[in-house]
Image (cartoon, rainbow, N blue to C red):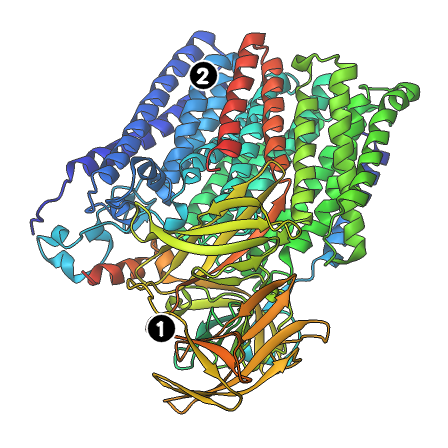
């Protein structure tokens, strides 16, 4: 059959270049391996020359593949499954990029493109190590491309190509018609959760971080294969720093994304997918510190090897966790069931890259030089090593708990996450934060090999005192109110807080007193300062995060007759319903849901919320702002929300929509009609009648719990509906702070609003009645205050700058280049984390 | 590094290992009937929404009260109370992971993870369903 309207050429071109890249990477890898084994110089050079050619052919091929995918997505060629699944006509160009890395195939291409970029730099810089390092990089390329090559061996398909056709992959009646394309009006499009600028920027950075971890591994391999165990550390250091920097920033970008546009209610939830990215970073940091120790003292070479090899292994392990669907029941990030094929391919990756290098390490273990003399306890290297080890063990703990679904699979058990997942991690890592805080604070003042006690005490005394004073000031003036886990955990938070403040102060003081402001040499101190500041911000913002959408404090709340779980209606709950145009108290704010406004994308609506803080003594408004959280409502009623956040220097007010009313186009024009009603009088309305049974002063009943000191009147009304229902209603009138508050009662089923409007003559009462034909517009939202969250982002910025300074120093870059790089990184991150979206 | 420091490190590792074992109170995946046998114990249920029974949720009355019925593949059935908003995809979900504990006759749930076909666009069956609607 001939199909109409298909564009098959781009797919053929694209697939050709996939195959070319695949073959070229294999050729390049074999040539590089061969070159690294040859002793003869001229022959070696010609092999390297050949391998380079193949390398650049696969680089160009991959760029072509990338452009071709972009082309089929941007032209909405839905005959391609990739375009159909990930693109749609309304997507803006930047989201077209995002839809490339939304899919498995596209993200592998992104990863391998970074390998190409890094490989090109290595070709020109790594000199005699080029052959073994590039052999590893191109071998990794080969495996990555295997995942997208899409060729058949017999009946088995190897890898899944991004250029497969919709009609070949999916069964459907329309595909038996030649004009099937005319039925496919639009693609499925980018998941609405991912339509965010972080989706454009975060995956490339994170994948650069992941891709760059192969470079230290390549250096380690080059030394193991040439049995020249000692001289790889120095050139590998800037690369390891780079990898730590990029991966760290990438992970926290994910956190910032989760915080500002996914409704996870925070920046870190110990979700398995987050942990899977964090663990390789932590192990790499351990490796980095061991490398630094070796570089200065000759110790910890074996540990450097081990950590670098393990860091890469855990990169692959995290790929396995996040891409094979094994986390399906434990992670909020829904990853797809990729089936056996992905497991096999990742298995191949481990078997041909990680295991051989590990084997070489074990095989050569005895030959790797190690200093037999024990480190002095007052030496810097001893404590750096302890710190690395603690960090490594913490990483193992995290991945150990995260791997639960893997144990279940392997051992057939049925263990599940603990009840409070976050606390399971927090209670261990709060202690790690303490140890790391203290270590990063004082080890700067230690000298390699041996430190005089006097010198240490003289320098450390002032930072310790300042940190103690600051911590005590916090205890008294800004206490952490995280009491739900008991006093033990609260004390642990304070101890960790002290350690991180200590580290901030000590590192700042170190820059000033010891380095005398010589920032060039202070990369480590700057990075540690930033890290400690980040931890300080995390402890404070999470410890004092407040839910302000507490439903206890509004009159709106009407309990169901009986909650079978026996929950008291006074229990604080996080969701609060706001009726349109009804001011509602929320924390210190009076919040009014004013109106909706449609966004340029279909199905997306912004909800305008007016926040006002009114000074109770003067009655004046002290704070006044609008927030516009939004949500997408899809055609099958799925709701996907983006938070609205008000940023202040010291705190954020954070809201997001959890439920919305079904939209109705007609405006509600009904007004309250006032009836003057005596006790036991009957009033009719369109769907029935109601009787005013009594008016109670300060009642204490199922609905209200007033005490004699209050001033409140509550009407006791029974509503008899046409449908022979009998419902009680209690509109109320409360006087507090010389203000009258009306607490209306709403009978949803009757669409009846009752209001006790005041007293009338002759012992009668004014009862307001409003009937509405359409349901009231409302939204339910959660609102939090995150205090001092900017410390987290500022800390990250400083840490990244510290890394850049260190890279500049280790790579012996000219001062102005380092300075420019720092400025560039600082400006970019400052814009992304603190300016954009606020 | 010498033997003594290795011993210290192994001791630290062991201490952390012990800490880990005692600190992590893993829960289990259960069926509705086995969860009913251990009331008050925190479990995970893999179940599906019982569409023949009513879903009770009214955000205006109480945004933090959702009640529905869940069944599992072994035929167990229970009422579920969730003190939070109703996940918008609840009715469309084909599998739900409920975290919580049995209290009396109801399952008091503190976390719902929905497995929705719409999220699984890589799932071929779902794509086929979508395509056959054209």
Please name the residue that numbered disc 2 is placed on: A123
Residue B100 location (% of width, % of height): 59, 69
Give A353 or A645, whichever is nearer the viewer. A645
Residue A772's tag is: 1
Residue occupying image coordinates x 52% and y 37%: A253
Residue occupying image coordinates x 71% and y 46%: A429
Q: Is residue A465 left or right of residue A14?
A: right
Residue B52 location (% of width, % of height): 39, 81
Which residue sits furthest right?
A454
Chain of residue at mark 1? A
Q: Is residue A832 left or right of residue A245?
A: left
- How crowded pointer 2 is (Cα within 10 Å; few <14, some 14-19, many 20+) is rated as some
> Can you tell which of label 1 and label 2 is closer to the viewer?
1
Distance of label 1 from label 2 (alpha carbons): 74 Å
Residues beneath discs 1 and 2 located on the same chain? yes
Give A748 or A745, whichever is nearer the viewer. A745
| Res A93 → quadrant | top left
* SS category of the residue bearing label 1: loop
| Res A114 → quadrant | top left
Residue B40 in sight from this viewpoint: yes
């Amino acid at each position: 059959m001939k199909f109409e309207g298909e564009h098959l050429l781009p797919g053929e071109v694209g697939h050709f270049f996939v195959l070319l890249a695949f073959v070229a990477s294999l050729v390049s890898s074999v040539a590089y391996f061969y070159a690294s084994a040859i002793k003869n110089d001229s022959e070696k050079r010609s092999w390297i020359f050949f391998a380079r050619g193949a390398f650049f052919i696969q680089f160009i091929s991959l760029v072509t593949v990338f452009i071709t995918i972009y082309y089929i997505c941007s032209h909405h060629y839905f005959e391609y499954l990739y375009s159909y699944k990930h693109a749609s006509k309304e997507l803006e160009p930047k989201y077209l990029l995002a839809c490339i890395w939304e899919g498995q195939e596209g993200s592998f291409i992104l990863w391998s493109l970074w390998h190409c970029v890094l490989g090109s730099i290595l070709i020109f810089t790594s000199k005699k190590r080029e052959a073994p390092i590039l052999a590893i990089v191109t071998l990794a390329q080969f495996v990555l491309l295997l995942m997208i090559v899409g060729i058949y061996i017999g009946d088995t398909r190897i890898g899944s190509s991004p250029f497969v056709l919709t009609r070949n992959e999916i069964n459907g009646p329309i595909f038996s018609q030649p004009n099937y394309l005319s039925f496919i009006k639009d693609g499925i499009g980018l998941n609405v959760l991912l339509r965010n600028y972080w989706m454009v920027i975060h995956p490339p950075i994170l994948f650069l971080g992941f891709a760059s971890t192969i470079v230290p591994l390549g250096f380690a391999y080059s030394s193991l294969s040439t049995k020249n165990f000692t001289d790889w550390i120095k050139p590998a250091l800037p690369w390891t720093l780079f990898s730590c920097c990029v991966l760290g920033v990438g992970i926290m970008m994910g956190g910032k994304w989760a915080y500002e546009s996914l409704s996870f209610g925070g920046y870190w939830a110990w979700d398995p997918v987050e942990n899977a990215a964090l663990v390789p970073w932590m192990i790499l940091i351990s490796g980095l510190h061991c490398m630094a120790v070796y570089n200065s003292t000759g110790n910890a070479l074996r540990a450097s090897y081990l950590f670098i090899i393990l860091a890469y292994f855990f990169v692959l392990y995290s790929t396995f966790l996040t891409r094979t669907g094994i986390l399906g029941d434990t992670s909020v990030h829904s990853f797809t069931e990729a089936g056996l094929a992905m497991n096999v391919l990742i298995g191949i990756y481990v078997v041909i890259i990680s295991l051989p290098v590990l084997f070489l390490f074990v095989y050569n273990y005895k030959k790797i030089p190690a200093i037999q003399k024990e480190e002095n306890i007052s030496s810097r290297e001893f404590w750096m090593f302890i710190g690395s080890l603690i960090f490594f063990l913490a990483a193992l703990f995290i991945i150990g708990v995260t791997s639960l679904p893997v144990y279940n699979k392997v051992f057939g058990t049925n263990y599940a996450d603990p009840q409070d997942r976050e606390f399971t991690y927090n209670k261990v890592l709060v202690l790690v934060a303490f140890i790391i805080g203290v270590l990063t604070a004082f080890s700067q003042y230690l000298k390699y090999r041996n430190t005089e006690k006097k010198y240490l005490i003289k320098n450390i005394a002032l930072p310790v005192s300042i940190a103690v004073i600051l911590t005590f000031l916090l205890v008294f003036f800004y206490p952490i109110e995280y009491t739900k886990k008991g006093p033990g955990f609260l004390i642990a938070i304070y101890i960790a807080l002290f350690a991180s403040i200590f580290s901030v102060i000590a590192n700042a003081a170190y820059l000033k007193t010891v380095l005398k402001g010589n920032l060039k040499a202070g990369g480590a101190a700057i990075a540690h300062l930033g890290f400690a500041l980040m931890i300080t911000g995390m402890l404070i913002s999470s410890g004092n995060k407040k839910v302000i959408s507490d439903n206890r404090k509004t009159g709106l709340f009407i309990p169901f007759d009986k909650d079978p779980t026996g929950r008291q209606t006074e229990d604080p709950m996080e969701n609060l319903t706001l009726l349109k145009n009804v001011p509602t108290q929320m924390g210190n704010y009076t919040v009014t849901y004013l109106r909706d406004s449609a966004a340029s994308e279909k199905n997306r609506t912004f909800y305008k919320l007016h926040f006002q803080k009114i000074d109770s003594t003067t009655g004046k408004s002290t704070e006044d702002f609008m927030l516009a959280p939004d949500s997408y409502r899809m055609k099958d009623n799925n709701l996907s929300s983006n938070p609205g956040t008000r940023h202040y220097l010291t705190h954020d007010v954070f809201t997001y929509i959890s439920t919305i009313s079904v939209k109705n186009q007609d405006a509600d024009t009904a007004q309250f009609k006032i009836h003057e009603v005596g006790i036991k009088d009957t009033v009719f309305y369109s769907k029935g009648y109601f009787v005013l049974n009594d008016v109670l002063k300060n009642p204490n009943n199922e609905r209200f719990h007033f005490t004699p000191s209050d001033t409140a009147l509550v009407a006791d009304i029974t509503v008899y509906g046409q449908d022979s229902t009998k419902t009680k209603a209690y509109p109320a009138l409360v006087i507090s702070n010389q203000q009258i508050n009306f607490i209306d009662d709403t009978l949803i089923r009757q669409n009846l609003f009752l209001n006790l409007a005041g007293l009338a003559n002759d012992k009668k009462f004014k009862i307001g009645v409003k009937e509405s034909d359409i349901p009231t517009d409302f939204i339910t939202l959660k609102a939090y205050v995150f205090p001092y969250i900017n410390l987290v982002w500022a800390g990250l910025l400083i840490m990244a700058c510290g890394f850049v300074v260190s890279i500049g120093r280790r790579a012996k870059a000219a001062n102005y280049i380092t300075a420019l790089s720092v400025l560039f990184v600082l400006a970019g991150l400052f814009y992304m984390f603190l300016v954009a979206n606020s | 590094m010498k033997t003594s420091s290795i011993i210290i490190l192994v001791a630290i590792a062991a201490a952390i290992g012990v800490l880990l074992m005692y600190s992590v109170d893993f829960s289990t995946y259960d069926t509705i009937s086995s969860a009913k046998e251990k009331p008050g114990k925190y479990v995970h249920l893999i179940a599906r929404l019982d569409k023949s029974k009513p879903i009770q949720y009214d955000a205006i009355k109480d945004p933090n009260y959702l009640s529905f019925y869940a069944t599992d593949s072994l035929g167990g059935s229970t009422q579920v109370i969730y003190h939070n908003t109703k996940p918008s995809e609840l009715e469309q979900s084909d599998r739900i992971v409920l975290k919580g504990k049995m209290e009396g006759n109801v399952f008091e749930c503190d976390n719902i993870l929905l497995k929705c076909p719409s999220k699984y666009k890589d799932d071929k069956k779902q794509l086929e369903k979508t395509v056959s609607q054209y």
